[in-house]
Structure formats: structure tokens, C-alpha cells
Amino acid sequence: MKILIVKLGAMGDVLRTTPLLTELKRQYPEARIDWLVDKACREALDRNPLIDRLLDDPGSLKNGAYDLAMNFDKEDAALEAIMAVSAKKKMGFGRSGEGKLCPLDERSAYAYRLGIDDALKFRQNTKTYQEITFEQAGLKFKGEEYVFAPQIEDLDFARLHLKTFGVGLSSGPRLIVGINTGSGKRFAGKKLPAESYAELARLFYKDLGATVFLLGGEEEVAWNQRIERLCETPVFNTGSHTLRRFAAIVKACDLVISGDTIAMHIAIAVRVPVVVFFGSTSASEIELYGRGRKVVSKIPCAPCYLKNCPIGEKCMKETTAGMIFDAAREVLAGVVS
């Protein structure tokens, strides 16, 4: 049996679609699975042991034929790919006869409605992304984990990199906390004020004696330097790295603090406990696998999924360092959600 998965991006969404691979391989152990992904997100799937062929060019599908093809993206490129590919059965999202986005069968009707019904998505939905995508594939989600892991060379890099800060990963019981300060540019309301990150670092250091890492990507280099200057206690700015090297650094942490970002997905993937704060995006769709807590803004307009906030990201200003720290203490004590 030949199966095609179309999930182009974004990086976090690609990662949280990987649990499907485990169940597909269980249902069809002899199946060959191909995955079409954006070049920018390919690193999330490179060397995935459950993917037989990783594709980043829709043109490579022209001469292929599949028994089952599934598309979990609403982007034009994904819709064009799923409609053009030759497959005995197609599931997920596609185009209608009029060329409009539509569910290809009843299993994707709910996922489709989430994209057009704000009341359903923002207030009523209780299903996680994994439950929704498994439903689209005609499967039942039973807690399957992300299929992603840093390689040995990435773990070796992290060990040596963190050693430059005087941090030994096997040197003793000292708590290591990673505070991710990035948010991406797609939505507002996913990043705390700089002062809140500095206060969090202070609380972890003074109250728990923790070693604190500032995590982020290329876009957070200057931002983390600013936070570092605001800190009254020691912090270690880990810098910008490739996805898998970043994952290896995250894996070195005992706990990660993050908004709804790729760092959150990485922490989930490498099974590090995480405290996630939410403003503009929906907390209900995030599956923490019993290893974390969610701090959800109570502001009436949240979630909103707006790119530009008309009220100055009040949701993030009202999410205090103390609220996040209290949730972190609960996670460290084994109280999770």
C-alpha cells in the first residue's frame, strides 16, 4: 500500500501531525509512506524512521500513484497537490468543482468548520489538533507521541555548547529551566514583555536555585540580549541554532516555559515538561501528553488569531511572571494537565 501525506507547514503543525505516522504504520505495517512538505519545514521530518520518501517539490508527485492520499493543509499549494495527485482514495482538504476549499469527505467536515466558525474554534471546541487530524484520517487518537528526535551529533553539540556556559548536563541535581522568548510573526499575543521574562528568570534562580537558559531563534538574538541586560540574576543566552540542535538544547532542560510556538512543540516532541501561556491562540487544540500546564488569558477577546492587536497585546501584559511561575512549580511537583 502506498500512502501520501500532504502537510506543508508551518513547522509546529508539521511536527504535531507526525503522531499519525505511528498509527498508520500500525494499521498498515507494509505500507510505504511519502510526505510532501515545504522546503522550509523539511528539517522537522528529515531522517524520520516512519517516512519512506520525503518530498518538497509538488512536481515530484506527477508520475506517482497512491492507494491513499491525505491533505491536512488549507494552503493553495497543498490543495493543488492533493487534487492533482493520482490516488484511489483522497481524504482531508481539497477543492470543490467550483475550485473552493472543501472537505473531501465527512470525516473532515469538523476540521473545515473550525476554519470558518469562530464560535466553534474559539469557544466550543475541546478537541486537540491530534484528535482532529486523526479524525480526518479515519483514525482514533490514543495518545500517540510526536515522531521526532535530535540525533547523537546534535546531543553532542548541545553538551559541548552548554559546557561553554559552565553548565554540565550530568553534574548534579541543579534544575535547568529553558525560557523561550520567541513568538513568530503570524499572530500577536504570543510573547510576553521583556520585563516579564527577566522576572521569570529571577524567580527561578532565587526561589528554586535553577540554571536559566534563554531560548530562541535568529529573530530573538537581539531580544534575548535585551532580556539578559534586564536580568538581575545569572542567565545563559543559548543563541540561534538549527532545529535539531535547538531540540537537543531543549532536551537538556528539566522544564521549558514558552508561548504557543515551535519551541513548545519541540519540548513536547522531546518529552520535556512545559508550561505554555496562551493569548491569541486556542489552548484547547494543544496536547501536552500529561507533561505540562497551560496558563490561559482570561481577557474577553482571547483567543482572536489576529496578526495585529488593537489593544497593545493586553493579554500578554496581564499574564504575569508570577502566574507562570506558580504553574511551573505545580508541574515540577507533578501536578499536570
Image: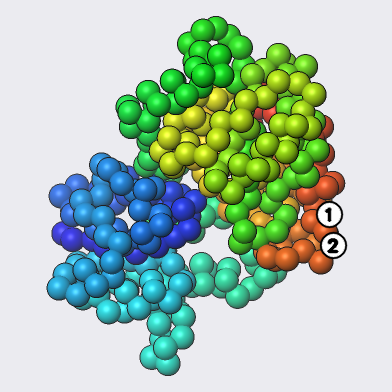
The residue drawn where x is 77% and y is 28% is 231
Residue 314: which numbered mark, if any? 1
Contact check, label 1 and label 2, Cβ < 8 Å: yes
Q: Residue furthest top?
A: 172
Question: In x, y percent, where is residue 109?
Answer: 49, 72
Secondary structure of the residue carrying tag 2 is loop
Instruction: Establish if 72 lies above or below 96.
Output: above
Q: Residues within 10 Å of mark 1 (few under 14, many from 20)?
A: some
Depth check: give the residue in front, 192 or 89. 192
Question: In x, y percent, where is residue 199?
Answer: 80, 31
Left or right of residue 184, residue 17 in this image: left
Gap between marks 1 and 2, in whole Å? 6 Å
Question: In x, y percent, where is residue 212?
Answer: 65, 24
The residue drawn where x is 78% and y is 44% is 193
Question: In x, y percent, where is residue 229?
Answer: 75, 32
Q: Is residue 190 visible?
A: yes
Q: Quadrant of residue 326?
A: top right
The residue drawn where x is 37% and y is 42% is 147
Instruction: Establish if 57 lies above or below 252.
Output: below
Instruction: Establish if 225 lies above or below 126.
Output: above
Q: Amino acid at mark 1?
A: Lys
